[in-house]
Amino acid sequence: MSDTAVIHEQAAVPQPAQHGRPGGMLRHTSIITGTVAGLVLAVITYAIGSHYFVPWGEQNADFSQVGLDALVAATYVAWVIGFMAGIGAFAGPIRWALGHDLTHADAEYMAGRGQGKWRYWKYTTDHKVVGFQYLIMAMVLLGLGGFLAMLIRTELGVTWAEVFDPNFYNSLIGTHGIVMVIAMIIVVAGPLGNFIVPIMIGARDMAFPRLNALSFWLLFAAVPPLVSNLLLGGMRDGWTVYQPLGNQAPVGMIGYQVCIIVFAFSTGIASVNLITTIVTMRARGMTWNRVPIFAFGILGSSIMGLVWFPMFQYSQILALSDKVIASSFYIPQMGGSVWLYENLFWLLGHPEVYVIVIPATAALLELMTVFLRKPLFSYKIAVAGIAGVVGISSVVWVHHMYMTGWAPAAGYPFMLSTELISIPFGFLVLVMLGTIWRGKVWTRLPMMCVYAVIWCKIIGGITGVYLSDVPVDQYMHGSMFVVAHFHFMLMGAGLFAAMGAIAYWFPKMTGRILNERIGSIGFWTAFFGFQLTFGSMFIAGLQGMPRRVLQFDNAFNISNWASTIGAYIIGIGMLVFLYAVIHSWRNGQPSGSNPWGSKSLEWQTETPVPLENFPVLPVVTSDPYDYGVPDPYDEIERELTDEGAESTVGAR
Amino acid sequence: MSTVDDRPMADADGPEEPTNRPEVTHRLREWLSRPYARHIIVMTAVFTLLVLPAAWLVIHFMNLTGAPASAIMSEIEKTMFVFTMVSAPLMAVTLAVIIYSLIGWGRVTGDEPPMQASPAIRGNAIGTGLWIGVTSVLAAFLVVWGLVELATITSLSYGSTPANQQPNSARPIDINVTGQQWVWSFEYPDNGRITSDQLVVPIDVPLYFNVTSLDVVHSFWVVELGIKIDANPGAITNTGVTPNKLGTYSIRCAELCGLHHAYMETTITVVTQEQYDAWLREHGGKRTV
C-alpha cells in the first residue's frame, strides 16, 4: 500500500448543456417533501378507495369488511410511491425522458456538494452519505427491535399473569423478528458496505450512485408500513408468517407484506450495486488476491441477497394476492399448498442468516490483522470459506422443514448439505484462530469484540450441528432451543461483530475515536447479559418449552426468569454502548486519518473523507496485510536444517 | 530462543552422512518444544475435561419431565450425548487458543498503534491441512451418525422394529390426530371411532398417527416420546412411536398457530394394556385386536 502513483487527469469530455441550476428538481426535494407527498397520496388513495370502491357495511364470511384488505394495500403502496416521488427518486428518469442528461454540476449537486448537514436528509448519491443514512436507520431499527424484545421478555418473565393480550404479544414477536432481521441485514452491509468498501477498493463512489440512494430510500419507505402494523391489529404470526395463518390476520399483516416486497427491491438494488462496484471499480493493481477480505465478505453477502431475496418477495406477493384478491396459492381448502409458502420463505430464510453473518465475520477478519499486527492467516482459505458458504447456503433450506411432513425423505440429503456447510464455516474459524496465533494483541475495543464473537460462534455452531440432525431436530424444532441457537448466531456472531466493526471504522466515518471505556462497559455488559439470557433459554428448550408462547408450564419458570433478567442487562449494556456512540460522535477525541496504523486503503485517505475519496486514485502493489516481522522460529528452522547450516556452524 | 541451545547439534545425531532432510518427526518435536504449544495442548486437554460434563447435563435437562418414554427419545438423547462429546475437543481447542492469546503471547495497550512485533505468518500448510482434515472427518462422522440415526428412528416411527427389539405381536394402533385452533382431538378408528381430547395409549404397543389440521399449520409434539410432525390443512402426515414407559406426558403445539397457541396442549397417558382396555370400555369403544 505504500507505493502510489499519480494518475493524470483525464482529458475533458464534452458535457451536456446545463438546464437551469445544477440539481434541477432535486433542489426542492427532501425527506420532508417525500413524507408529505407520501402521506398525501396515501390519504387520497384511501379516501377515493373507501368512497368509491369499498362497499361499506358488506361483510366477508369471517365478518371482516369486504375490500378493506385491498384498500389498505393500495394505501400502503400509495405511501411508498408518493414518498419516492416526493423525495425525488423519479427525477432521474423524468430528466432522462425529457432528454436532459446530468451535467457534472448536476452530479456534484446530487452527491451533496455544498449542502452541509442537510444532505443527509435528501436523495443524495454520495456513498458516504448513504452509509451514514444506513447507519442511523440500522440503529433506529435495532433500538426498536430491542425495545420489543424487552416487552417480550417482560411477558415471559411475568410467569403468573398475561401482561399483553395474545394478539398484541404475537404481533410483538413477529415485529421484533422481522425488524431485527432487516436491521441485521443492513447493519454491516449498509453503513460499512456503502461507506467503507468503495474507499477500501480505491473507487471514487459506488458503481451506480443514484441506485445507491434509491436502495436506501426504498428501505426508508418500507419501514413505516411494517411498524404501523402494531396499530392496525398487528402481524400476529411470527416473522415467518406461515400461511394460511397469515391470511387470518388483521390488516396489519399487509404492512408486513408491503414492507417485505419493497425491502426486497431495496436489497436487490443494493446488492447489484455492491457487486458491480467490487467487481469492476477496484483500484489499479488490486488483483483478486489483493482485495481486502471485507470486500469479499460484502461480495458474498450481496450475491446471496441478490439471488435469494426474490424468493422472499415472491412468497409475500403471493400471500398478498391471497389476502387481497382471494387467490389460493397457500389456501388448502381452495387447492393451494402450505408447503409452497414454506419452501419459498426458507429459500431466502436460510441464506439470510449468512447474508448477516458473512460480512460481519469478514469485517472482524479485516480488523484483526490491524490489532494483531499480523497478516491474515491463509487468505485463500478465507476466500474459499466465504465462497463455500455462499455456494452451499443455497441448498440447505429444507432443514427448516424437516418436521413439516412435506418430504420426510428429504431429511437425508439436506442433513448432508447442512452439516457440510460447517466445513467452509470452519475455514473462517481457522483463519480467525490462525491470525490470533502467536500474535501480540493490541487490546482495543474492536479487537475484544473478536474474542466475544468467537465464543458465540462456538456455541452457535455446535448447537447448529445438533439442529441440523433430523432426529435431534425432531425434539428441538419449534422449541426455545432453536431461539437460543439463532440468537447466538445472529446476535452473538452478527450484532457483536457489527459493533466491533463499527467501533473500528468509527474514526474513519466520524473523525473521532469511539470512547473506549464507556463503549467497553456497554459491550461487555451486553455480552454477559446475552450469555445469561440465551444460556438459560437453551435449558428451557432442552426441557421442551415451545417458542412463541406467552404462558407455559411452571417447569420453565426459573430459566425464563433468568432469561428476562439477562435481557434487561443486555438492554442496559446496549444503551450504554449507544451513549458511547452518540457521545463520541458529538465530542469524542479526534482521531486523525489513520488512528489504528492500518495499511488498508480506506485509512490512507484523509478524514473526513473528501467528496470523491482520493485526490488521485491509488495504485495497489500488495494486499493490505503486510504486517509483522519475520518469524523467529522460521529462522531457527532454517539454521537447523538446510540453507543456513554451514553459516550457523561458522557463526558458533 | 533457548530451544536452540537445548537440542543436540543436527549433525551429531548418528553416524550417517548429514543430509539436508530433517527426520520425519523433527518438525513435530521442534514444535512440541515450543512453550506455547505445550501450554495450548495442556489447556485443550483441561478444557475438554471441563466441557465433557455438558453431555450429561444436556441429557439431565431433557429428562427432567420423565423422558425418555420411547426408544425414539432414547436415540435422540444418545445423539445429543455423542454430538456433545465430539464437539467438546473442538470447543476446547478454540477456547484454549483465544484464552492463551490474551495471556500467553503478550498484550499491548495504549493509544498508539504498536510496533510490529508479531510474526508474519501468512499460512501454514500443515496446520491448515490438519484443521480441514479433522473438521471434515468430524463432519463426515456426524453426517454418517445422523443418517443412520434417521433411518433408525424412521423405522421405529413406522413400527417395523418394536421398541424393545423383541418380536412384537401387538398390532399397531391407528390414531387420527386433528389440530384446530386451539385444541387437539384424537380419534381411535380401530376401536369404534371413539374420540378424546386426551391421549390414552397402552405401553409397548406401536402407535401410528395420521395427523391433519382443520385450519392452519399446527405441529403435533409429544415431548417425552420425542416425536413431532406438522399438522397441515389439506394433507395427512404420519408419524409413529412405541411408548415404553408408564406415565403422563405432554403434547404441545410446536408451530405458532394463532392467538392461543400457548394453550394448545394436552396430555398423553401411557397405561398398561388392562387399563387401556378398561378406558376403551368406559368410553364406549371396543377392543379389536
Image (cartoon, grey):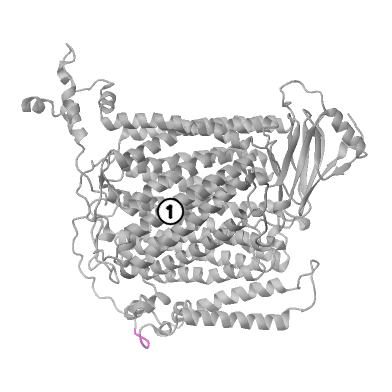
Report the residue that reaches farthest toward the front: A160
**Residue under the point 39% across and 31% down:** B44
Q: Is residue A626 left or right of residue A354?
A: left
The chief SS type of the magenta part is: loop
Neighbourhood count class around disc 1 (C-alpha, 10 Å): few under 14, some 14–19, many 20 upward: many
- Report x, y in % for residue B272: 82, 29
Question: Where A490 falls versus B23 (above or below)?
Answer: below
Q: Is residue B169 above or below residue A556?
A: above
Q: Position of residue A594 (x, y in %)?
A: 24, 60
Res B2 quadrant in image: top left
Chain letter behind tag 1 = A
- For badge 1, the amino acid type reads Thr
Q: Which residue is mark 1?
A: A525
Magenta highlight on residue A169: no
Query: In x, y percent, where is residue A632?
Result: 19, 36
Point out the stretch of residues depicted in magenta. A17-21
Q: Residue A616's x, y, as percent?
A: 22, 66
